[in-house]
Image (cartoon, rainbow, N blue to C red):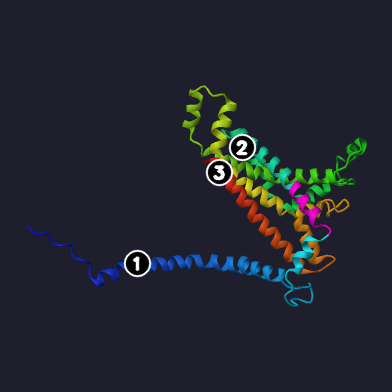
């Protein structure tokens, strides 16, 4: 008994099938084009310009005056505030990240169960996130003012101040950031908590696990992807801190609260007016951000393994 081979589709049939696929691909490109244009115009082109500026002598008013690599990077590292600003930014990043993650996780655990009271608490915790950072900084600037703050008489009697010393300025600014962003990170933590299956908790209770054991052995391991996301966001935002310190402290007292982004602004538009050196600092910050985020993600992935 002979078996006939299946007939191959004709060329016209293949063309008919290819047309819908080609139209779908064309529609996909059309949908992606606006986003691609924005990314190229607002990210790729400025990034390339920053790299070029970092390798050129580029005064603020005179413009490009030729390549002078690597002089800008040498001047950036040798700047009198560079080392201090890096150390202060790292100190602030560590403090803000730990406080934000701890408070956000605590608030998420507090309002994890859905109820009318918890829904009200969620909205209350999230309200500060709706306020812009510059607006929140101006609000706290008035609150910290020795002339307008309602707490100024109490602070004077105790011999304390909000912004007059390096330590108090750091703590006061960190309090602003925690107040502003804790609700936002609480929402991210809450999404991660609600993604954990209830059967896992039931199995842990059946095995006789305590609340602390359930939190340590079940909640934290299953919440690891959310913790990785929030940690990256916290660290990145803290390393790029600018508005809160620029409005509250202006880098004071005694230039003790200058962040790296503040230093970029100072070099570019105050004093030196040197966009080349400022761009070199920006490139250093970008490289540091990429390395730090890569190390964070690698640490979380190795922890999962």
Look at the picture and state if 63 lies above or below 246.
below
Which residue is under mark 2?
Answer: 108
Q: Name the element at disc 2.
A: helix
Work out how far the residue at label 2 is from the one at label 3, CA to CA, in angstroms. 25 Å
Looking at marks 2 and 3 on the same chain, the residue that comes earlier in the sequence is marked by: 2
Q: Quadrant of residue 152?
A: top right
Which residue is under mark 1?
Answer: 20
Work out how far the residue at label 3 is from the one at label 1, CA to CA, in angstroms. 44 Å
Q: Which residues are magenta?
A: 80-91
Q: Name the element at disc 3.
A: helix
Q: Name the element at disc 1.
A: helix
Q: Residue at x 78, y 66 (%)?
A: 268
Q: Nearer the viewer, residue 144 or 168?
A: 168
Work out how far the residue at label 1 is from the one at label 2, CA to CA, in angstroms. 47 Å
Q: Quadrant of residue 114?
A: top right
Local crowd size for mark 3, using a 10 Å CA cut-off: few (<14), some (14–19), many (≥20): few
Q: Main secondary structure of the magenta part?
A: helix
Q: Residue at x 18, y 62 (%)?
A: 6
Query: Is 93 left, or right, of 3 in this rendering?
Result: right
Looking at marks 1 and 2 on the same chain, the residue that comes earlier in the sequence is marked by: 1
- Residue 28 x %, y %: 44, 65
Which residue is under mark 3?
Answer: 302
Q: Nearer the viewer, residue 259 or 15?
A: 259
């Amino acid at each position: 008994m002979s078996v006939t081979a299946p007939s191959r589709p004709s060329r016209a049939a293949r063309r008919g099938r290819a047309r819908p696929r080609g139209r779908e691909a064309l529609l996909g490109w059309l949908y992606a084009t606006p986003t691609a244009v924005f990314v190229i115009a607002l990210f790729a082109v400025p990034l390339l310009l920053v790299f070029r500026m970092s390798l050129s002598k580029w005064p603020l008013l005179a413009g490009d005056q030729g390549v002078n690599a690597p002089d800008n990077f040498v001047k950036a590292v040798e700047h009198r505030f560079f080392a201090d600003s890096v150390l202060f930014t790292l100190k602030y990043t560590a403090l803000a990240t730990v406080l934000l993650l701890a408070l956000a996780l605590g608030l998420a655990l507090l309002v994890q169960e859905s109820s009318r009271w918890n829904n009200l608490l969620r909205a209350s915790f999230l309200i500060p996130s709706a306020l812009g950072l510059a607006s929140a900084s101006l609000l706290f600037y008035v609150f910290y003012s020795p002339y307008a703050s309602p707490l100024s008489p109490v602070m004077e009697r105790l011999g304390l101040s909000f912004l007059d010393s390096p330590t108090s300025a750091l703590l006061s600014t960190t309090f602003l950031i925690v107040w502003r962003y804790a609700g936002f990170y609480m929402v991210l933590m809450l999404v991660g908590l609600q993604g954990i299956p209830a059967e896992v908790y039931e199995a842990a209770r059946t095995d006789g696990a305590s609340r602390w054991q359930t939190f340590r052995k079940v909640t934290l391991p299953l919440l690891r992807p959310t913790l990785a996301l929030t940690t990256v966001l916290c660290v990145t935002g803290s390393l790029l801190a600018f508005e809160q310190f620029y409005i509250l402290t202006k880098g004071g007292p005694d230039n003790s609260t200058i962040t790296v982004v503040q230093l970029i602004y100072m070099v570019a538009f105050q004093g030196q007016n040197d966009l080349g050196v400022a761009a070199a600092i920006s490139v250093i910050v970008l490289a540091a951000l990429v390395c730090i985020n890569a190390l964070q993600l690698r640490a979380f992935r190795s922890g999962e393994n």
